Each structure stands twice: as C-alpha cells, then as structure tokens.
Image: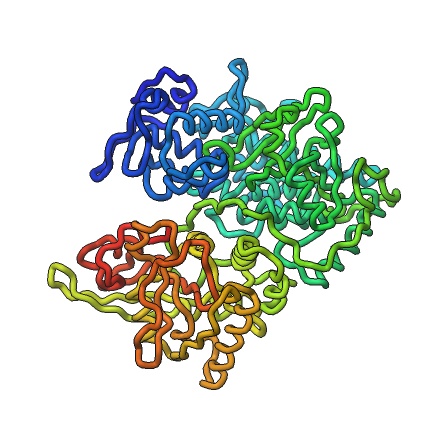
Amino acid sequence: MLRTVDPRIGSYLAEVGPLSVPRGYQAAPSPDLVLAGMALLQLGQAGELVAVVQRLLNLTGVAPFLALSGLFDLLTRQAVQRYQASLGEGETGAVDADLLIALLTHGALANPRGADQAPRCAPQFGSAAPRGSVPMSSLLRADEARRRGAPASPQARPTARGVPNEAPGGVGPTEGTRIPPSGPADAQLAQLQRASIESARRELAAGVRDDGRNRSPRVDQYARDGGMNVGQAWCGFFTGFNYNEAAREAGGRFTENVRFHSMQKARSYFEYRNYTNNSRTENARLDALQERQTAEGSPRRWMVLSGSGGERHAAANGRPHEVYEPNNLPIREGDTALFSHGHVGMVESYDQRTGRLVTIEGNSTGGRVCRNEYDLNNPAHRARFEGFGRPARSDFAVEGQPAPEAQGPAAPAPNAPAPNAPAPNRAEAPPTGAPGIEERRAAPNNGVSLGLPPRPEGAPTGSEFLASTKGLSREQREEAILQQIQSGNIPDHLRQFQEIEVRSTGRDGQAHVGKLRVLPDYLAVGSNEDFVQVPMTPRVAQAIADRTGTSLPTRKMVDDIYRSADVRLSPQPLPPGAQMMSSEYYARHHGMVESQRAQRGASPGQLTAGHQKDLVISNQLTAHPDRVAIYGWHQPNGRPIQPLSTIHEASYADYSHGVRLVGGTMNVDGVERPIAEVLADPNLAGLISDEGVIRSPRVP
C-alpha cells in the first residue's frame, strides 16, 4: 500500500486498500510527488490515489457519483473539471497539488471528526459487531412483523447486540405498539419528530450502508417505502423512511414520503409547492392546505440562513420562508436539513449558542448512514446548507387520533412573509445550474417493460408541462424533464419494449442472430391522451437510462429500428435559428408528428421511426466527451438526413432530437447477454454496432 507523509491521505489510503494497475493504464504518482508539485494525477493513470480522489470528489457533490475504481477514466476527468469549475479555476481535468489540498480540505468539512471522537459512520459489521449495535436481521424481522400485523415479541423487536430486550431506553418501541401523540398540534409534531430521530439512530446503530451502487437489503427498503425504484441516491429516501417509521409507531403513516426523493422536491414541499406539478389546480390546492395547516397551529416551515441559496430561491419565487442567523435559528431534532449540493439529512440536535449542528444522514460518506457535525458559525460549513424544513402535524396521518387542536397561527418569525403569501402565477424554477445527477445505475433491464413507477395522480399533461417550462433556462427545463420522466409521468405506450431481429457475422466467421428490445417511440412526458415528445441533453438521457437499466442506441441500432418499424414517418424540418431549442418549437414539431401519424392511421404503440434524430452512443465520444452524438432522421428512401455527428456541445438539444431507449440486455444466439458485453465482444459487436467494438457504451 502507498505511504504518505500527509496523515489525511493516509487515512483514506487505509480505507481504499491496495489496487492493481490494469493493462492500458499507467501507475498513478505517489501522493507526496503530487503534493510537492512534481507530478500530476491525470487521465490514463490508475492506483490507490485515484480511488482516494474519486472518494473526495463524491464528497463535494458537484459531479455524478463515481465508483471507487482507482481508474482515472473520462468520468473521473469530467468530475475533476466540474470541481475545478466550482472553484473558478481552469478546467484542466488533472489534479495538481493545489487541487488535491482543496479536495482534502473539502473532505474534512464534509465529515469533520475530532481526534477524541468516535467514528460517526456505523460500520458494516458482520459477526463481530460492537456492543449496543442492532443487527440488520433484527430490523428486517421487525419490519416483516409489522407488515404481518404480528403482536409484539422479543423475536420481532429490534434488539441491540449485547443489550437485553428489557433494557431501559432500548433501541426502539415494541413492534405493534401504538403510541399516539398528544397535546397541541406542535407538541404532537415534536413527539413524532423525536420518534423519527430515534428511528434514524436505530438505522445508524445497525450499520446500514450500500454496496457502492445504492443497493443493499435495507437501502432497497428505503426506496420502496418512498414508492421509488431501487438503485438510486437514497439520502432523501432515508429521511422519508424515518418520518414514516414515526407515523407507523403511532398507528398511521407519513403522507408526504414522496416529497423527499430529492433536495429540490423536499424544498418545494416545505415551500408549499409540488416540484413535478406546477399546474394552477395543484398550486391552489397547496395554498388552501397552507391556510388550513396554519390555522391548526402546525404549518410546514422553511427556515433558511441569511444569504443562503434557500433564501434566494424562496424570495425569487415568492414562497413562504423564515430568515435567521445561526444564533437564533430555531431548528430542533427531527427537522430536515437540505444541502446546497443536493443532499438531504435529518437534524439530531442544534445549539444556538455555539452553532454546533449534529445531523444523521443517509448515503453519506462511503454510502453509509452517518452522524455528522457542522459549525454554522463557520462560513464554509454554513454555505453547505440550502435550509432547514419542518413538516406539518397533519402530514402525519395517525389513524383514530383526534385532529390537532386549532390554535391560530403562530407568531410570525423574523423576516417571514405572511402565512398566506400569494404564489406567483408562473412555473417554479428549479435551481440555476442544478446539481449534477448522481451516476447510480440499475441492473440491466432484461424485461419487457420500462422500469419506471406508475404515472402519479395529478401529474401534468404534456401540454401543461410544456407551458410550465416557458421562461425557464435550458438547464432548468432539463432538470424538469428529468424529474417528470423519473417520476413516471409518461404515456403507457412507452412502458413496453418491442423486439426486433438483428444479424451479423463475427470476426471468427460465425453467423449470429440477436433479439434486441426497443421502445416503440421516443421518450415523452404526459398522459395517454396528452403527451409531448421531449428532446433532452445526453446528460439527462443517460441518467434516465441508468435509472431504468437501459441503454441509448448505436448508429446501427437506429438503422435496424427504422428497417423494422411498423410506421415510417417522414422528417419535417422547421426553420433554423435560436428558436430550435425553445419549448414552443418542441410543441410545434410534436404537433406535426402527431398529425402525420394520424394521417397514416397509425397509433402511438406501434414501432415508429423516421421523425426524430437519435441521441446515440459512439466511439467518437471518446475523443469528444463534451459533445452530443446524433444520427438519423431517415427519409423515405432510407437515407438519414443527419449523418453521425458530434458537432454540438453536450448541453445542446433542439426540437429534432429524440431519445429512444433499448433494453439493457439482448438475446444472442439463444443466450441473454448485457448490451455492454455484446458491444465489447469483437465477434458479437457487429450485431448492434457498425463502428466495431464500443468500449464505453454510454455517454460521458
């Protein structure tokens, strides 16, 4: 293992362990050489120091999540460039002494730890667990007992290792017990919040962590509890799960669990808005809810520090918020902490006198449940927080309990707007420069359906969604498209794959036959009756593919899909210009496509091609990772208007672009194989690639 004179790097190296240098890579320089300014860490190198930098980059939250592979690949270089941009430095993509020191300093702020303090991240223990920790099996048995409605029993109760069931102050309430909150509305809420933190402490003690890909039995439970697919960033799922646990212990449920899937969704929740539905009907419902909950004496609260991003966002959108300094910030245990880089955690305690904040966070350092400390009097720590939220008492539906006592509105907080401040009649803008999407991938999709949740009740139609994006920046519109599709707001005909046959002869002279699964059309937002196809950048398209375990097509796949299509529509170009990237052009072109489809007597569920250019994966992206690869728009004679091109930057998307996903696996000569494996096999790649082997089957 590498040794270094810097103890900070030494501690990370000890966690990473020794790594080999694979063929095609050069050994990374030693940490001391980099810190002395005598070497750079850069593309094409491999080793323990690369894995340390990948871990430190993950702590910054400025780029998609990196696997700790120890390989300085294109994704790692892109993450380095994003971190350099966040510091206002030149985006070289290489790590020098100054950048490594900056990363180490950021890592210390992300998880500060004094020498005399015990580790705050629970270990993933096996047979030798520390006394007082809760075995994962106990938590899983307890959950199963609750689902069955089993009575309390020692076997169904989470029990700390080495601590008897009857020990005072145990790890949690007896399963099956109903503990209804009592007193005024806010006092009831405080009891529920206290129970949520007790739940978080149990998860911390149990050593919950993921496998590096957002998967483990318990982490999967967090996702399912929030109505989401497994394999995603789970910090918000963890918070919602603990609120739900508190409600279940009181005999009910937390009704707003789905609002904690991301920082942006949670922030909108505390501001009485719905991040994925900005329709007038939904806004009116939330305004009425705010008025009712205020009258009950326990409204949702959004508490921000002066000068924070949370203050700027709420003020710009006319949403209710309370502005404080660290010495009068009134947060308490069980409040939600929202981080400016997109992270979500829970407040365990806060001391106004010292500014010391203690949180429990899911998906923290090393993909674990961790206890972290921050000093809000330290500007660097303070800048990490978007704000702090508190749910309303009536967001916890506790069956059989009386409604919270009406108390009238609480005294207004300093700098807080009137409780019923009117909302502007415009789309809520996601934050400018939305945080990078974490690169967490589902297993390859080998089924017949796209792995997205059912369309949410009340989700905007296609026309409503496009109307809500007018006035948004391109980045904000991209984030809105991603949120809508990941939430399941797509028409039913885009949920089922169709199968096409492909053939080739390998380099070994053997003939091969493959069955490729493809979506019948390009991704769209909306209902069965009112949907609109939405162009998007490769960043968003790849995030959706990762989420669903699918792939973007190659150039050959696009040709084969056109050849196999039931319906071949003709390209319909619009006048060029800046308006090509506008929502108005998106709507106009979609209307033309649907009119042509109707004239052909075709239905949306049929395999259709020719009407859009495809975003594709290509070997050309290896040399141009900052570009988008497009191809297609086939004419009736079968020739594409658009040859394979990487002329546009990766942030470009216009009305003519479309995203068609293909299944993550395919059948090759009767055997199911991952798409990535087929593309990497010289004898099989010809089935789905006319560029030969494709080593990186995704966009950078």
Q: Number of numbered discs present?
A: 0
Residue 491 rendering spot, x and y as whole percentages? 53, 68
Q: Residue at x 20, y 66 (%)?
A: 504
Q: Quick one: 509 or 196, which is closer to the camera?
A: 509
Q: Which colour style is shown? A: rainbow
The quadrant of the picture occupied by the N terminus is top left
Residue 440 horizontal/vertical position (percent): 44, 46
Residue at the extreme front of the image, as rendered: 577
Residue at point 72%, 47% (across, down): 395
Q: Position of residue 618 (x, y in %)?
A: 31, 57
Quadrant assignment, res 4: top left
Q: Residue at x 51, y 34 (%)?
A: 364
406 horizontally vs 515: left or right: right
Q: Position of residue 626 (x, y in %)?
A: 38, 50
- Asked if residue 632 is positioned above or below residue 320 in the image, the reply reads below
Q: Is residue 561 above or below residue 630?
A: below
Residue 252 in view in this figure: no
Residue shown at the point (53%, 44%) measured from the top left: 435
- Furthest residue in direction top, as rendered: 116
Q: Is residue 357 left or right of residue 131?
A: right
**With respect to residue 229, does 108 lie above or below?**
above
User: Would residue 587 be visible to someone looking at this image?
Assistant: yes
User: Which quadrant of the view contains residue 521?
Assistant: bottom left
Which of the pair 113/179 is nearer the observer? 113
**Considering depth in this image, is 366 or 46 the residue closer to the camera?**
46
Relative to 205, does residue 483 appear above or below in the rendering? below
